[in-house]
Amino acid sequence: SVPASIASTLSSGARKGLLMKGGAVIEAAAKVLAIAFDKTGTLTHGKPKVTDIVPAPGVSESDLLAVAAGVETGSSHPLAHAILRRAEEAGIEALPATDARAIVGKGVEALVGGAKAWVSSPRHAEESGGIADDQSEIAARLETEGKTVVAVFRTGQSLGLVALRDEPRNDAAEAMAQLRAMDIAPVILTGDNPRTAEAIAGQLGMEFHASMMPEDKLRLIREMGATGGVMMIGDGINDAPALKQANVGVAMGSGTDVALETADAAILRDRVVDVPALIRLARAAMANIR
Ligand code: ADP
Ligand code: MG
């Protein structure tokens, strides 16, 4: 019977770490024609490592790291963990910071020693008018190498740049090949900059949309959904609106609670190949019913 087939698909999925919140999710997943992947923490491990530290003229590496680590103490972003780890390894103590607040999709700001300090994308720094031309050029070069670059400021003064690298998950390329063989088009949606996005997208043979704010991700999912079923895979708070908008929102299991609550399905084992596996499972269930 129909309910029996749905129930057995839900439970066999669960045994493989593919959680679907009900039969309607199976039906929608079987119809998916396009998939949007968040980059950081979804296609990549989400465990970036600091690769370069570029202090501004007259600033020491330890001053730069002490301020950056102080500001990032108030953030749960993967970039924040990486910067704190690097400071700790270098034996540099984070300066005490208060009133930390996320600049969504752009960075984080806090009071360090009573002065306003922030760590953000170079783009946000440029908009705020504070980054020197040669620092912008260095940032662009590092981004072309596939690195994410953040700029560090205190009292409106540039202290320098920190570059970080986040490797694609080992099975990401295989998962994309499987999806294309299933006639499903995978694209990257990322808040990161176009140069870094292109470096990762190139490795995986994917299309990409970069510099996306949460509302941009939402709008793009709505547009993609106009021509057929669209699935969104993400892990962060910034992905929640897009996860909700998609016909099927899927959270990576190690992601934030907000992503897990908003999503229709979750991939508990953090394997990208579980995305095509989930769709195969859903397609097989629907074929059984018909
Ligand atoms: P993604 O969509 O790739 O998960 P986010 O929207 O979380 O990216 O972040 C977009 C960009 O904003 C990052 O690439 C970084 O430049 C900046 N950013 C966000 N949070 C932080 C933070 N805590 N520290 C430094 N930079 C940040
Ligand atoms: Mg993310």
Image (cartoon, rainbow, N blue to C red):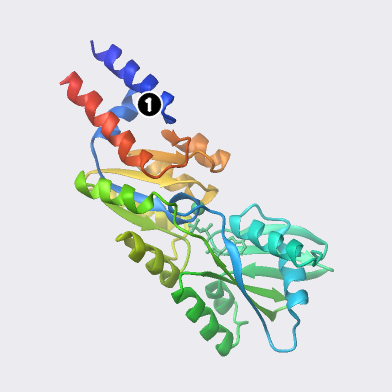
Q: What x and y, as percent, mark residue 288?
A: 19, 20
- Image coordinates of residue 196 in percent, x first then y, are 44, 69
Q: Residue at x 38, y 51 (%)?
A: 172
x and y percent of residue 36 in the render? 35, 51
Which corner quadrant of the image does residue 127 belong to?
bottom right
- Location of residue 212 in the rendering, given as x and y in whole percent from the top left corner: 44, 61
Residue bearing the label numbered 1: 13
Picture mark count:
1
Is residue 245 rendered to the left or right of residue 132? left
In the image: residue 7, left or right of residue 150: left
Q: Amino acid at mark 1?
A: Gly
265 w.r.t. 48: above or below: above
Q: Say if 138 sits above or below 69 in the image.
A: below
User: Residue 239 versus residue 183: which sits nearer the camera?
Assistant: 183
Res 130 quadrant in image: bottom right
| Quadrant into which the C terminus falls | top left
| Farthest residue, direction front | 170
- Secondary structure of residue under mark 1: helix
For the N terminus, the quadrant is: top left
Is the distance from the Cβ of mark 1 to the nearest ligand 2 atom less than 8 Å? Answer: no
| Residue at the (76%, 58%) spot, across then down | 99
Describe residue 91's horizontal placement relative to residue 159 as left or right.
right
10 Å crowding of disc 1: few (<14), some (14-19), many (20+): some
Q: Image point 55% across, 75% down: which residue?
A: 122
Where is 54 relative to 281, above or below? below
Q: Residue at x 41, y 54 (%)?
A: 217
The quarter holding residue 163 reads bottom right
